[in-house]
Structures are given as C-alpha cells and as structure tokens.
C-alpha cells in the first residue's frame, strides 16, 4: 500500500473551514484514499473515502487531485468537537483491509 | 444499532497475570480486527479474522498473545503472562467484509495497565 505524508499539526478557528492535506505520491490506480479521525480517548472514526472522484458526505468533503498524488479533507465549518487526530490512509481495493495508520495530523479547533 | 462493544473498558493488572479482552462486533459484520495503540508505536494491527477464521496474525507481538473468535458475535484477545510493556489501548474493529473498500468501525477500546 502507498505511504502517506501529512503535516503533524494544524490549528483552525471555530466556524472556519479546515483543509487537511495529504500526499500519497506513490498511489496506484486501484488504491482508495480513506480518512479516519480519532478524538481523544475514543476509537478511530471513519470520515470519508474516495477512489478518483471528489466525495462529500455529512461530515466532510474529499478533494482528490487529478493525478491522485494528493488529496485534501475539508471540514466545512469546524467546531470544537472536531479537535482530533486525522489519519489519511491509502489501501488497495482488493486488499484484506489492513489499515496502516501513520502519525496523522493533530487538528486543534480554537474558539 | 449498537456499535462495536468492548469489555472491560479499563483493566489494571499485575505483571504475570492473564488478561482477557473481549469484543462484540457489529451484527452482520463478517470481519474483525484487533489493534493496539501506544504513544511510541501508534496504532498497530495485531490480527484479523474473516468469517471467524484468523487470516493474518503477523502483527501479534509474541507468543504471549493469542486471539480467538468462537462465533460471529464474539472475539477475545488474551495475554498470558502479561508484562508492563503490554500497557496500551486495545481496539477492536469490524467491517461487513474483508476488502480494502470496506469501512472499519472501531470500538471504544480497552485501556490496559500492567504494573
């Protein structure tokens, strides 16, 4: 599975959009981009995933570049409850589902 | 629908004791995963099952660790004997099937402290 690179931390003001970047320059055509987050003292939580097209759900939007070498997770209106570690993971579509979590990005939403 | 259920939520034990962690996956999910999280190593996949059968246990740290899934609604992770370095948060996750395109749903975790 392709490796990912994320900034270690970022701050965001409450109510503003949070844009979380992820580089996955070695991604292959049959690898999904997944985003999970982990709020302190809780288990990881699924946010969104995509293969080629941009995706949106009730939690966030995922923008994948045309060459698929990077992506951005967008939290449109960050709240204090969005403070968490956000993990970007790439995984083969036909793999056994082995998620490999990196260090992620610690996002702190401030009032 | 209840999510993944883990018990106990907290466990404090002494070195050398046996520890058993329990997990009930989401009903209808066929795949189950055990992870361990520490500050030093982050989140690590220990073992996973598909249709109650262990598929890959290469992440299990050593023979002191064992996992079973006797039926579709129950799994255990056992450490015998426990050591202080086993102190960590242990998460169980489940998914509908074993595929990269399937979302994994995590339980709240068991915080283990071995003294």
Image (cartoon, coloured by chain):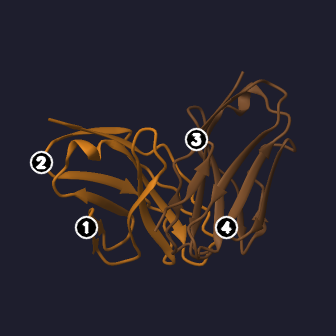
Question: In the image, which disc is placed on residue A58?
Answer: 1
Residue beneath the point at 87% across and 44% down? B63
**How far apart in space, not on screen, are marks 4 and 2 (Cα)?**
41 Å
Residue beneath the point at 65% across and 55% down? B23
- The x and y percentages for residue B35 are 63, 50
Q: Which residue is mark 4?
A: B73
Q: Chain of mark 4?
A: B
**Disc 4 vs disc 1: Cβ atoms closer than 8 Å?**
no
**How far apart in space, not on screen, are marks 3 and 2 (Cα)?**
34 Å
Q: Which residue is mark 3?
A: B9
Residue beneath the point at 29% across and 59% down? A72
**Disc 4 vs disc 3: Cβ atoms closer than 8 Å?**
no
Quadrant of image for the N terminus of chain A: bottom right
Q: Secondary structure at mark 2?
A: loop
- The x and y percentages for residue A88 are 43, 56
**Disc 4 vs disc 2: Cβ atoms closer than 8 Å?**
no
Q: Are marks 2 and 1 on the same chain?
A: yes
- Among the two numbered marks 4 and 3 on one chain, the one whose residue lies closer to the N terminus: 3
Q: Secondary structure at mark 3?
A: loop
Q: Chain of mark 2?
A: A
A89 left or right of A92?
left
Which of the chains is orange? A
B96 left or right of A37?
right
Q: Are marks 4 and 3 on the same chain?
A: yes
Nearer to us in this view, A61 or B15: B15
Foreground: disc 1 or disc 3: 3
Nearer to us in this view, B79 or A18: B79
**Disc 3 vs disc 2: Cβ atoms closer than 8 Å?**
no
Q: Which residue is mark 2?
A: A15
Q: Secondary structure at mark 4?
A: loop
Q: Colour of chain B?
A: brown
Quadrant of image for the C terminus of chain A: top left
């Amino acid at each position: 599975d392709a490796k990912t690179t994320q900034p270690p931390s970022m701050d965001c003001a409450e109510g503003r959009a949070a844009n979380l970047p992820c580089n996955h320059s070695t991604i292959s055509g049959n690898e999904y981009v997944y985003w999970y987050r982990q709020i302190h003292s809780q288990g990881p939580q699924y946010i969104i995933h995509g293969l080629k097209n941009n995706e949106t759900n009730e939690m966030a939007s995922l923008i994948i570049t045309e060459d698929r070498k990077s992506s951005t997770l967008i939290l449109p209106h960050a709240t204090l409850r969005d403070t968490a570690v956000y993990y970007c993971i790439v995984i083969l579509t036909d793999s056994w589902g082995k998620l490999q979590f990196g260090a992620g990005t610690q996002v702190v939403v401030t009032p | 629908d209840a999510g993944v259920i883990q018990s106990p939520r907290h466990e404090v034990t002494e070195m050398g004791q046996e520890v058993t962690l329990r997990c009930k996956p989401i009903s209808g999910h066929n795949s189950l995963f055990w992870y361990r999280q520490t500050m030093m190593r982050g989140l690590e996949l220990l073992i996973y099952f598909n249709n109650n059968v262990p598929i890959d246990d290469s992440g299990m740290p050593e023979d002191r660790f064992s996992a079973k899934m006797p039926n579709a609604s129950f799994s255990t992770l056992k450490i015998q004997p426990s050591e202080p370095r086993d102190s960590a948060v242990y998460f169980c996750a489940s998914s509908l099937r074993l595929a990269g395109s399937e979302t994994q749903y995590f339980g709240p975790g068991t915080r283990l402290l071995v003294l």
